[in-house]
Amino acid sequence: MEKPDARRRDERLLRSAFIISSTGDWVFRFALPVLVLQLTGSAVSTALTYAIEFVPFVVIGLFSGVVADRADRRQLMIACDVVSAAIVAGIGVLCLIDPPTVLVMAAAFLLGCVRPFSFPAFQGFITERVAEHRRASMNAWVQGADGTLGMLGPVAGVAVVTLLGPTAASFVNAASFAVSALLIAATAVVAAGRRLRTSFGAACRSLVPDAVAALRMVMTQRALLWATILLTLANFTFPAAAANLVYIVAGPTGDVPASLAVIAAAQGLGAVLGAAASPVLLRRFSAGTLMAAAMAVKVIALTLPALWPGIGALTVCWFVVGTTTSTFIVPWRTYRQGAVDPEFLGRVVGLQRAIPFAAVPVSSLLGSWLVVEFGVATLFTAIAVIQFFVWLGTRFSPLGRSGSSSVEVAGPSVIPAAQPSRTGGN
C-alpha cells in the first residue's frame, strides 16, 4: 500500500526535475539562435532555427499523446530526458568544429522530435501523482518556475553565450537533462499505475484509431474545439515576434546587447506574477473569464511596440505578455485536467499542441519577412490585429464560459467505443 506522503514526495521530485531541466533550456534558448546568427548573419535563418523545432510537434504530436497514454509515463519521461541529453551534447560537440548551419538545424529538429512525447507524459503524470485539489497550485508552480527561469535565464544565457559561447551552453543543457532523468527515476514505481501493455505491432495499429478518437473528442467538446482553434490563431501573434527577438535587438551582426536579457527577463517576471495570482483568481472567477481577460490585455501589450518601437516598449510588452500567458495557461490546464478523463489526457494534450504548433514555423518566417522588409512597427501592428480576433473568439466562444456549470465535461463516454483492447499487467 502506498504511503500517505508518497505523492507529496513525488510532487517535489517532479518540481525539481522540471526546474533543473528548464534552467538548462533557458540558457540553450539563447545559444542556438545566436550560434546560427553568428554563422549566417541572416534573420530568416535565425527564425528558421526557432521554427524548425516546432515542426515535429505538428506531425509527431498527432501520435505522441497516444504513446503517453499507452506507455508507462514515468519511463517515457526518463527516456525523453536521456535522449535529449545526448542530442544537446551532440550540438555542443558540433559547436567545437565550426559546423555547417544545416547540421545545427538538423540537431535542433531531432531535439524537437523528443519534446512532443515528454509534455503530454508530464501532464498525464500530474494527474497520477498530484491530488486533484493541488493541481491548480501545481500548474501555477510550474508556470511560475518557468517564469522565474524566464526572468533569470536570459541573464545566465546571455552571460554564458557571450563569455563562454554556445558550446558551454549546450553542455549545461545536456547536464540538466541528465539530472532531470535521475530525479524522475527516483519517483515511486507505483506512479505508473495499472498501465496496460500490448505487443509492439498492436501498439502501432492503435496509433491511428487513438489519434482519431482524440480528434473526435476535441471536435465534440466545444470548449476543447474552440481552444484548439484560438490557440492556433494565437501562434500567429507573439511567437512571430519572439522568434525574431534576437534579430530585432541585436541586428544582423549577432552582437548581443544587455537589453536582450532585460526584455526576456521582463517576460519571466510577468509570468511569475501571473502564475502566483492565478490560483487566487481562480477561486473568485471562472477559468473562461480569466482566459478572456488575459487575451484582451495581451492585445494592448502587442500594440505598444507598434506605436513606440524601442527597448522600453518591447520590455513592457514582454512583461505583460508573460503575465497574461500565465493567467491563461494555469486556468486552461487546470480546467482541461478536470474536464478530460486522465486515461485519455495524453492524446488530447498531444493533439492540442500539434495543431496550434503548426502555425509557429509559418508565423516565425512571416515575422522575419515583415521585420526585414517593413520594420518592427509593421510586425507588431499585424500581430496585434490578429490578437484582437483571438480575444473576440475567447470572449464569445464556449471557451470563455469554461469552468462554469454550462460547459460540458469530457469523460470516458466521449471516446469512441472502438478502442484497441490492451492486456497485461503493470
Image (cartoon, rainbow, N blue to C red):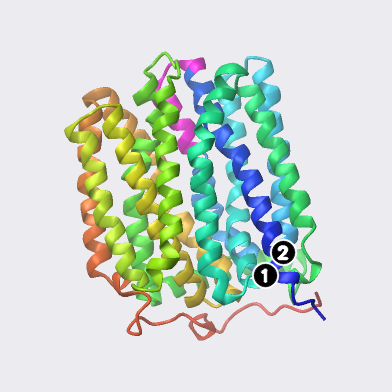
Give the residue pinned by disc 2. 10
- Depth order, front residue of 175/344: 175
Residue at x 40% of width, y 44% of height:
360
Q: Is residue 51 magenta?
A: yes
Q: Residues within 10 Å of mark 1 (few under 14, many from 20)?
A: many
Name the secondary structure under disc 2: helix
The answer to whether any part of residue 156 appears in the image is: yes
Q: Which residues are magenta?
A: 38-52
Predominant SS of the magenta segment: helix
Contact check, label 2 and label 1, Cβ < 8 Å: yes
Residue 27 as seen in the image, left or right of residue 252: right
Residue type at the position of mark 1:
Arg
Going by the numbered disc 2, the residue's amino acid type is Asp
Which image quarter is the N terminus in? Answer: bottom right
Mark 2–mark 1 Cα distance, whole angstroms, equals 7 Å
Residue 261 x/y as whole percent: 45, 29
- Judge whether residue 357 can be spotted in this image: no
Q: Looking at the image, which is closer to me, 336 or 187?
A: 187
Q: Is residue 87 magenta?
A: no
Q: Which mark is residue 129?
A: 1
